[in-house]
Image (cartoon, rainbow, N blue to C red):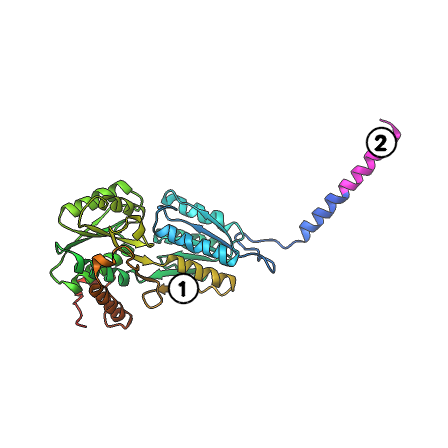
Amino acid sequence: MSTHRRLGFIRASLVLCAALALASCAKSNAPARAEGEATVPGPGAPLRLAMVTDIGGLGDKSFNDSADAGLQRAKTKLGAEVQTLQSKSAADYQPNLTVLADQDFDEIFAIGALMQKDVASVAKNYPKRHFAIVDAIVDQVNVTSLTFREQDGSFLAGALAAMVSKSKHVAFLGGVDIPLLRKFEAGFTAGARQIDPKVVVSTKYVGSFEDVASGKELAGVLFDGGADIVFVAAGKSGLGAIDQVRGRANEYVIGVDADQDALAPGKILTSVVKRVDVAVFKTALQAQAQKLPAGPVEFGLRDDGVGLTTFNYTRKIIGEARLARIAALRAAIVAGKIVPPETREALKLFKPVTL
């Protein structure tokens, strides 16, 4: 090697060594970050939101899609950056939550009661992160629990079903037999009995929120057994029940969570809308304002957190007199004159209320 080339090589080596020394010094002077500790976004940093779906996933036209609508509204209205991880099975919940907790999100939404234990565990391991869980209560300071009075909207659906039914036999088809779904079941049954104490209310559970074929089969069993209106609260499994009713005359289903009326116009009497989208968006607003509440936040009829649809396809089938009666029942629930039951035990004690 020539003397000139040797001197050039030495100068380049010295520059490289100096750069490495500066990087090492900067690293050693930086404060250590504890495991699970969040970095705080700088001023003007965009709101960052993430979501883990329940096993029904996006495309269920119900629960998860409603939550996603709230997330997308935050993206549009608040300029938020959003990310969604879909769960194929319950085994995905904790890994998905952990993946998101390892990133700098302002709020991480867990969509579904089945994630209760996983949220509790991950939130404990990441105390600087903030989580929101829908349909369950996690008693930790960095978790907001978003719950709904599903029994209130279901009560109105049951009353409507009993008024419209010609066979005086209606039915409830649930996804999984858990306390959350029993709120739908109890409210629906009580609402039907408010109208007609002798009405027959049959109940079945699919055992899954994602088995469309079984949802269709069981809805058929209920219809063939004499029910002419079936309230379906079964996530993606409910799409099977909607498919079942399409070819049946004088029989209807009632949808759930999102406004499903347009999925089979004229065959879905109404939907019990649970405004998960509203809950998600309101929580996003609180995250943006850095005023996230700890503990449970409940949404009911009073704040339009639950309710029925506007009957765009079935108003003539139902009739204005029945709709006026539904409005009176809604007002009675809001005023506290009627308290819909949320458990099977409370349902046994329920007595129709004279208005």
Mark closer to the chain start, 1 or 2: 2
Residue 198 relative to residue 143: left or right? left
**Residue 295 tag number:** 1
Is 8 in the magenta?
yes
The x and y percentages for residue 289 are 51, 64
Query: What is the magenta segment's predominant secondary structure?
Result: helix
Farthest top residue?
1
**Residue 148 tag number:** none
Secondary structure at badge 2 equals helix
The quadrant of the picture occupied by the C terminus is bottom left
Closest to the observer, 13 or 106:
106
The x and y percentages for residue 51 are 44, 51
Q: How many neighbours does mark 1 have within 10 angstroms: few (below 14), some (14-19), or many (20 or more)?
A: some
Please give the range of residues in magenta. 1-17
Residue flagged by tag 2: what amino acid is it?
Arg
Residue flagged by tag 1: what amino acid is it?
Gly
CA–CA distance between discs 1 and 2? 69 Å
Farthest left residue?
198
Is 317 in the magenta?
no
Residue where numbered disc 2 is placed: 6
- At a point 21% along the width and 59% down the height, the residue shown is 318
The x and y percentages for residue 312 are 29, 57
Closest to the observer, 240 or 182:
240
- The answer to whether residue 343 shows anywhere in this view is no
Q: How many neighbours does mark 2 have within 10 angstroms: few (below 14), some (14-19), or many (20 or more)?
A: few
